[in-house]
Amino acid sequence: MLSYDDNHPSASLIFPSLTYESILRVELPEGKHRPLRLRLQAAAAGTVAITLYENDLLESPGEPIFELTRELAAADLSTGKDGRWAIEDLRDRPELKGVIWIGMRKTAGEPAIWTSSVVSGQAYLRDRDPSRALGLLPVKRTPMLRLEVLP
């Protein structure tokens, strides 16, 4: 299981628009890995698009590997202290290797994701709207997002 948080959610991340994306850089161990599950700790209901990206030559999100949409309903929501995680099965997805980027953005409603106060150096925010030209901005809070893989 790969994660960069400290397992202590303390604030939620809201998405100000449909184009803002929270991105987590994940460095996989050596070799190819089969993705098993993606876990996220949801603070508010809504729909999110989750995209796994390749790493490009400039060490930033490149081409999408795959994208999925997840509706976060009341049953998926966590108080931040109850240990509840929304889980997405990834067993039918392509193998992963090297550095990947996991992006989350809202597509409907007002979803929010719990974050921890850990400054991981792996969490970023960007605006996918090309007219705003906002690149990757490092953020000081790490999303409660975990990727399970098998070698």
Image (cartoon, rainbow, N blue to C red):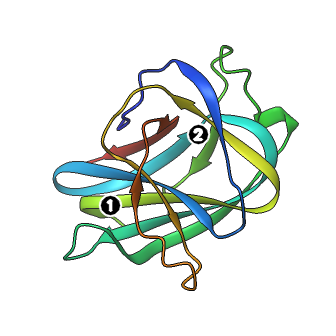
Q: Secondary structure at mark 1?
A: strand
Report the side of 79 relative to 63 (left or right). Answer: right
Instruction: Say which residue label 1 marks.
Output: 100
Viewer-nearest residue: 100 or 131: 131
Q: Secondary structure at mark 2?
A: strand
Viewer-nearest residue: 130 or 80: 130
Instruction: Say which residue label 2 marks.
Output: 40
Q: Are marks 1 and 2 in contact (CB under 8 Å)?
A: no
- Residue at screen point 31% across, 68% down: 60
Residue 49 against residue 14 in the figure, above or below: below
Residue 32 against residue 26 in the figure, above or below: below
User: On the image, which quarter does residue 94 sit in?
Assistant: bottom left
- Residue at screen point 42% across, 69% down: 135
Q: Position of residue 143 (x, y in %)?
A: 51, 39
Residue 78 against residue 74 in the figure, above or below: above
Residue 7 against residue 125 in the figure, above or below: above
Q: Residue furthest left?
A: 30
Q: Position of residue 2 (x, y in %)?
A: 35, 38
Instruction: Give the amino acid at mark 2.
Output: Leu
Viewer-nearest residue: 113 or 147: 113
